[in-house]
Every structure is written in structure tokens, then in C-alpha cells.
């Protein structure tokens, strides 16, 4: 009995010394000890949730952020995980969406005297709720297997839908003419009375023939200020996300790249849910705006 009392006293002194060394109170230590089981349970739950999220993350090859993770979890689970918890677990286990590098795309040519720049009518008014009213267009490039391909797109600001696109192995004017032709087919003569198409001041868009075709489609034309990529930010953002999510470097031929891009456009418009579209796809959000 005396031995047990001595052992208990020695243990208490030891605990006191260790608590003092760690700069914590004895009461705090005992509280933590009593809650140790809860800590273990929480850690196990966190790890199981991490493994679940990591499976989705790996399936997207790391090209997915917490918002899209949350939307994907909502599709898979009846009781969705809190987005704040998803962010906490991503920080805790150190897995994040792969960040794209700045777009190195530069002007390909200087406009000649016959080319005409136009004023910035849009003025970054990207918050639109009428499909077909504000359209953005731009050209980006893809490096693959030692070659370069160019992609011209038209995006609806309100729905974020890609309405028309053309992939080409050259930067001849035909790339934008074909894009306009596909846009005309997509609109099928239904033109918003205030419809405009906005671009940068690139060679293609200041070309008199391009501007003539835009007028024939009954579209107003707007241009970003020189050297100001923020004036066409949603289009730049789309290209950035596309390059993040598309393994275009693996393409060995132009045909393979075109097939990848065709599949991505279908996925983007019809399956890729977006946080700022009320978690809908562009096609779903377009129907939502029309019905509203």
C-alpha cells in the first residue's frame, strides 16, 4: 500500500515536471488525456475522408480545386461533405489543384494602316444574365509533340458556354472566319438585339474582312484596350482551365489533339459543373436563365 502511494506521488511529480517543461498546465494535460479517444476517432475519420477525396483528386490528375471537389462529392454522397472541411483536409494533407503558369501568348503581328481598332464597349461588364448578348472570342495555342496548333473560340459570358471553336495548324485568317461561320450556324439567325462580340486588338480582329463579317451577322464589335488582358478575362480564364485539365501534350498528331479538344468541349459544356453557375453546367445554366 505504501509502495503504491509512493509510486503515485512520483508519477505526479514526473507529470508536473513534464508539463512545466512543455509549458502546459496539469489540468490541461489531463483534459487532453480524457479526450484522447475523441482525438483518435477524429484523426481516423479525417484520414478516411482524405482517402476518399484523394481518389477523386487523382482521378482528375490533380487538376481540381476544392469547389469542384465539393460538387463531385455532392454527386457521389447522399450527405455531402462541408466545403470548409474539404479545404481543411486539403491543407492538412497538402494536396492542392495544380496551378497553371501565366499565358505566354503574344501578338503575332502588328496591325497595318488598313486595320482598324474599335472602342471597348463592353468595359468588363461580365455579369450578364441574358444568353447571346455578350460573346467573347480569342485565340490560344497548344504545343504538342514538337508542333503547335491554334484554337479559336467564342464564349457566351452569361452561360459560359463555348458556342463555337476552330482548331487549326496555322494562324491564317481562315481560323477566325470558320469560327464565325460555326457561330452563325449555332445562333441559327436568333440574334440578341444588343448582341456584341468582344476580343483583343489582335491582327485577326482588326482585319477589315473580319469586321465586315461581324457586321453581316448583326453583331456589334468591341475590343480590349491595348495590352490589357483583364478586359477579356473570362476568355483567358477558360483557356487556362482547359490547359490545366487537358493532357494535350500527350497528343502525337493533329488528329489526336482535335479529338481531345472535341471531347473536352462536350465535357465542359454538358458535364463540368461550375460554382458560380449555381453548381450547374453551362448548358443547364442556359436553360435556367431562359426559364427564369
Image (cartoon, rainbow, N blue to C red):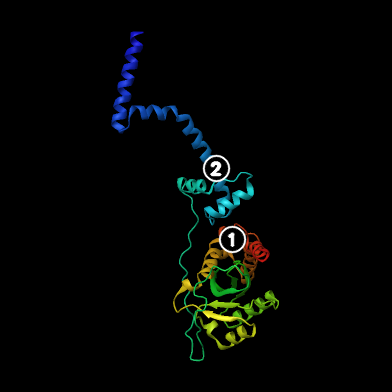
Q: CA distance from mark 1 to mark 2?
A: 27 Å
Q: Residue furthest bottom?
A: 114
When asked about the image quadrant of residue 155, the answer is bottom right
**Residue 62 on image: x %, y %:** 53, 54
Q: Which residue is mark 1?
A: 277
**Residue 250 on image: x %, y %:** 57, 63
| SS label for mark 2 | helix
**Residue 11 on image: x %, y %:** 33, 20
Q: Specify whether residue 44 is in view.
A: yes
Query: In the displayed structure, would residue 110 be above or below residue 128?
Result: below
Circle 2 packing at 10 Å, graded few (<14), some (14-19), many (20+), is: some
Locate the C terminus and report the quarter of the image it occupies: bottom right
Query: In the displayed structure, would residue 88 be above or below residue 124?
Result: above
Q: Which residue is mark 2?
A: 49
Q: Tell me what residue is drawn at x 55 percent, y 86 percent.
A: 207
| SS label for mark 1 | helix
Instruction: Tell which of 97 and 41 is nearer to you.
Output: 41
Instruction: Tell which of 227 and 151 is nearer to you.
Output: 227
Instruction: Tell which of 102 and 291 is nearer to you.
Output: 291
The label on residue 263 is none
Amino acid at each position: 500500500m505504501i509502495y503504491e502511494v509512493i509510486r503515485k506521488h512520483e508519477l505526479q511529480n514526473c507529470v508536473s515536471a513534464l508539463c512545466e517543461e512543455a509549458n502546459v498546465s496539469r489540468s490541461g494535460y489531463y483534459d487532453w488525456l480524457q479526450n484522447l479517444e475523441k482525438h483518435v476517432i477524429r484523426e481516423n475519420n479525417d484520414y478516411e475522408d482524405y482517402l476518399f477525396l484523394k481518389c477523386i483528386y487523382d482521378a482528375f490528375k490533380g487538376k481540381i480545386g476544392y469547389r469542384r471537389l465539393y460538387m463531385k462529392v455532392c454527386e457521389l454522397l447522399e450527405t455531402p461533405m462541408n466545403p470548409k472541411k474539404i479545404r481543411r483536409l486539403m491543407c492538412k494533407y497538402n494536396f492542392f489543384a495544380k496551378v497553371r503558369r501565366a499565358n505566354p501568348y503574344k501578338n503575332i503581328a502588328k496591325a497595318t494602316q488598313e486595320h482598324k481598332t474599335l472602342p471597348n464597349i463592353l468595359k468588363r461588364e461580365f455579369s450578364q444574365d441574358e444568353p447571346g448578348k455578350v460573346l467573347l472570342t480569342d485565340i490560344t495555342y497548344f504545343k504538342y509533340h514538337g508542333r503547335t496548333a491554334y484554337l479559336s473560340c467564342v464564349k457566351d459570358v452569361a452561360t459560359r458556354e463555348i458556342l463555337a471553336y476552330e482548331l487549326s495548324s496555322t494562324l491564317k485568317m481562315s481560323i477566325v472566319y470558320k469560327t464565325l461561320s460555326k457561330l452563325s450556324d449555332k445562333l441559327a439567325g436568333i440574334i440578341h438585339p444588343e448582341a456584341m462580340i468582344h476580343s483583343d486588338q489582335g491582327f485577326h480582329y482588326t482585319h477589315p474582312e473580319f469586321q465586315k463579317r461581324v457586321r453581316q451577322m448583326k453583331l456589334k464589335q468591341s475590343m480590349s484596350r491595348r495590352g490589357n488582358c483583364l478586359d477579356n478575362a473570362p476568355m483567358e480564364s477558360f483557356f487556362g482551365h482547359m490547359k490545366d485539365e487537358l493532357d494535350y501534350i500527350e497528343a502525337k498528331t493533329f488528329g489526336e489533339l482535335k479529338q481531345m479538344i472535341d471531347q473536352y468541349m462536350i465535357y465542359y459544356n454538358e458535364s463540368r459543373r461550375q460554382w458560380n453557375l449555381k453548381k450547374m453546367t453551362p448548358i443547364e445554366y442556359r436553360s435556367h436563365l431562359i426559364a427564369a
